[in-house]
Image (cartoon, rainbow, N blue to C red):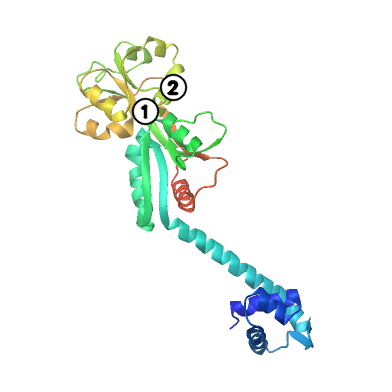
């Protein structure tokens, strides 16, 4: 069997045309170099170099073997680099962020599935609004983010990830809970609780409602709250109605604590996006998680 050390020595002798200089180049003694060449010639059944004093000349057999030796050495180097990259994906710490809905309802399950295949990976998940997570990725504080809106920042790259549906949520005894239909004008008749500015949910809701005329200007916003959980609790307490992700209230609806309604003529579907910096190279573990998420995206 051909050994990698023999290939390395062969290439050094070929390049330097000298056993002594080849020995210096690969940090071996000259007798050891001669021994590697002799063993390789014995294995191949052909003389690879003619030696005449200090002069070393490749034979026809040596010339025939040379391109294969180069390819063997190159593939060995490539294999080592790929395996080093793979090893890097198997350990390390990943700093990622999610806006409220992805961070609370989507990413924890995906992180668990990812870590089952890479148990040595540590993951730090930061949850915030879309604007703060996007800014953290842009500034290099986070490698990856999953957010509820695509913001106009040229240094960032977005990939569409999952679809989400926003719904109007009200207490079960609210007048809109049993109304035959709910229009944008109906929304303007009652107090409303919203997320803070910079929230992906708020951005998506306002973009959709803008298509329904001037209803946003007419809304009676009684509270702007910093998390979806706070909005849920406020609605359950009767403070007002709200537009939130359906994912966030499914348990409340099943338990009869909240009711959800669609708004006629308003398309409240939105996308979640993976976001990364265009010019920064991801760490091996971040690259692995990014690929893991891309394989699970919808649409």
Name the residue at 47% across, 32% down: 135
User: What residue sits 40% from the left and 39% below the top?
Assistant: 97
Looking at the image, which residue is at 42% across and 36% down?
Answer: 163
Question: Which secondary structure lies at badge 2?
Answer: helix
Q: Is residue 74 visible?
A: yes
Residue 177 occupies which quadrant of the picture?
top left
- Dot 1 falls on a residue whose secondary structure is strand
Task: Name the residue carrying label 2.
Answer: 208
Q: Contact, CB < 8 Å: mark 2 with mark 1? A: yes
Which quadrant of the structure image shows residue 130? top left
The residues bearing labels 2 and 1 have C-alpha atoms spaced at a distance of 10 Å
> With respect to residue 32, does 263 lie above or below?
above
Residue 207 screen position, x and y as percent: 45, 22
Q: Is residue 187 above or below residue 291?
A: above
Residue under the point 37% across and 15% down: 184
Left or right? Give the position of 66 relative to 106.
right
Foreground residue, 101 or 65? 65
What residue is shown with label 1?
A: 166
**Residue 230 location (% of width, % of height):** 27, 27
């Amino acid at each position: 069997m051909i050994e990698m050390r023999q290939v390395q020595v062969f290439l050094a002798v070929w390049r330097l045309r000298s056993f002594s200089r080849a020995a210096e180049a690969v940090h071996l003694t000259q007798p050891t170099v001669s021994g590697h060449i002799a063993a390789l010639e014995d294995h191949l059944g052909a003389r690879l170099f003619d030696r005449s004093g200090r002069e070393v000349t490749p034979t026809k057999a040596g010339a025939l073997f040379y391109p294969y030796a180069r390819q063997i050495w190159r593939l060995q180097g490539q294999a080592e680099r790929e395996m080093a990259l793979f090893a890097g994906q198997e350990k390390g710490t990943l700093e990622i962020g999610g806006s409220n809905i992805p961070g609370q309802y989507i990413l924890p399950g995906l992180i668990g599935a990812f870590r089952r295949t890479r148990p040595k990976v540590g993951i730090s998940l930061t949850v915030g609004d879309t604007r703060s997570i996007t800014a953290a990725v842009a500034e290099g504080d986070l490698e990856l983010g999953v957010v509820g809106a695509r913001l106009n920042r040229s240094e960032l790259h977005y990939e569409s990830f999952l679809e989400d549906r926003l719904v109007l949520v009200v207490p079960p005894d609210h007048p809109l809970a049993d109304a035959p239909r709910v229009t944008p004008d109906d929304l303007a008749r009652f107090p409303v609780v919203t997320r803070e500015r910079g929230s992906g949910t708020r951005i998506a809701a306002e973009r959709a409602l803008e298509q329904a005329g001037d209803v946003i200007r007419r809304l009676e916003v009684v509270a702007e709250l910093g998390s979806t959980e706070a909005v849920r609790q406020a609605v359950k307490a009767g403070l007002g109605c709200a537009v939130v992700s359906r994912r966030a209230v499914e348990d409340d609806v099943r338990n009869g604590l909240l009711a959800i309604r669609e708004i006629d003529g308003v398309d409240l579907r939105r996308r979640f996006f993976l976001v990364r910096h265009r010019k920064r190279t991801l760490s091996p573990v971040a690259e692995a998680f990014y690929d893991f998420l891309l394989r699970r995206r919808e649409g």
